[in-house]
Image (cartoon, helix red, strand yellow):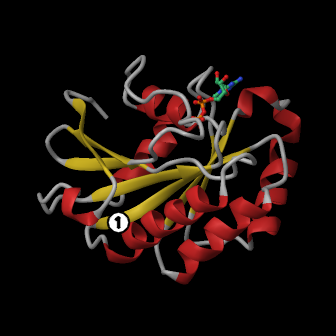
């Protein structure tokens, strides 16, 4: 896809700040450090549009990007930081719950999983919750360049088993280093626009 425009429109905390335009939207979610910023920058051909993970202590926000005046990507704060306080975790939970349950134009969630390891319990919980809400998921298995090609199937199978993968979803090995999976990711994203 040709990206003519990709810009952040708002960092929102609550629904009154979400953009009002009723265009389709895809959210991006994943454990901190999974490669979410690298994925966003790679598929939008931008060097530093999304910055690396929000560290604890910083305000956690939903970052809305407007793409080609046609749709929004929403970068949601990464989960799984060990050092986050109980209060911060609760605030994160409320923000995510409100967004995922109430955002009507949300078409699908791009959930990023580190392809090198078995999904964490946070990954499993997130996926189960999205399935409970009946939200379609595009699973992106990141850092595929770090695994020998011959082992890709084994790792993908482990992800499917652990997550109790819904065969109507997508599962795409991806590398921000080699751009493997970029076209497939766009094809999946386009199917929701
Ligand atoms: P975020 O916290 O999810 O936004 O993760 P980042 O995009 O900041 O990536 C975390 C780390 O993983 C950085 O050091 C990246 O350079 C590295 N990384 C991300 N994607 C890839 C990838 O596809 N291949 C490799 N080899 N490293 C990656």
Question: Which residue carries the number 1 mark?
Answer: 107
Quadrant of the image occupied by residue 128: bottom right
Which quarter shows the N terminus?
top left
47 up-or-down from 76: above or below:
above
Q: Position of residue 136 (x, y in %)?
A: 48, 69
79 up-or-down from 41: above or below:
below
Disc 1, SS: strand
Indicate yes or no: mark 1 CB to ligand 1 under 8 Å.
Answer: no
Q: Viewed as shown, does residue 146 lie left or right of 137? A: right
Q: Nearer the viewer, residue 161 or 93?
A: 93
Q: Nearer the viewer, residue 23 or 80?
A: 80
Q: Nearer the viewer, residue 158 or 87?
A: 87
Q: Viewed as shown, does residue 120 lie left or right of 66? A: right
Q: Residues within 10 Å of mark 1 (few under 14, many from 20)?
A: some
Q: Position of residue 58 (x, y in %)?
A: 49, 38
79 up-or-down from 69: above or below:
below
Q: Which residue is located at x 69 percent, y 52 percent?
A: 80
Q: Viewed as shown, does residue 148 lie left or right of 173? A: right
Q: Which residue is located at x 72 percent, y 61 percent?
A: 122
Q: Position of residue 183 (x, y in %)?
A: 47, 37
């Amino acid at each position: 896809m040709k990206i003519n425009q990709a810009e952040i429109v708002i960092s929102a905390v609550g629904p009154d700040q979400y953009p009002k335009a009723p265009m389709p939207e895809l959210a991006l979610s994943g454990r901190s450090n999974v490669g979410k910023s690298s994925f966003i920058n790679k598929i939008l051909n931008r060097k530093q549009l999304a910055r690396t993970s929000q560290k604890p202590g910083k305000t956690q926000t939903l970052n809305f990007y407007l793409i080609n005046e046609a749709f929004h990507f929403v970068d949601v704060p990464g989960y799984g930081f060990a050092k986050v306080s109980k209060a911060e975790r609760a605030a994160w939970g409320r923000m995510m719950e409100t967004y995922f349950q109430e955002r009507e134009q949300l078409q699908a969630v791009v959930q990023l999983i580190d392809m090198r390891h078995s999904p964490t319990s946070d990954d499993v919980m997130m996926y189960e919750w999205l399935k409970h809400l009946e939200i379609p998921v595009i699973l992106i298995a990141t850092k595929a360049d770090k695994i020998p090609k011959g082992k890709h199937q084994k790792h993908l199978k482990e992800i499917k088993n652990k997550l109790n993968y819904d065969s109507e979803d997508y599962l795409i090995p991806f590398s921000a280093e080699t751009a493997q999976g970029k076209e497939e990711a766009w094809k999946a994203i386009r199917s929701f626009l």
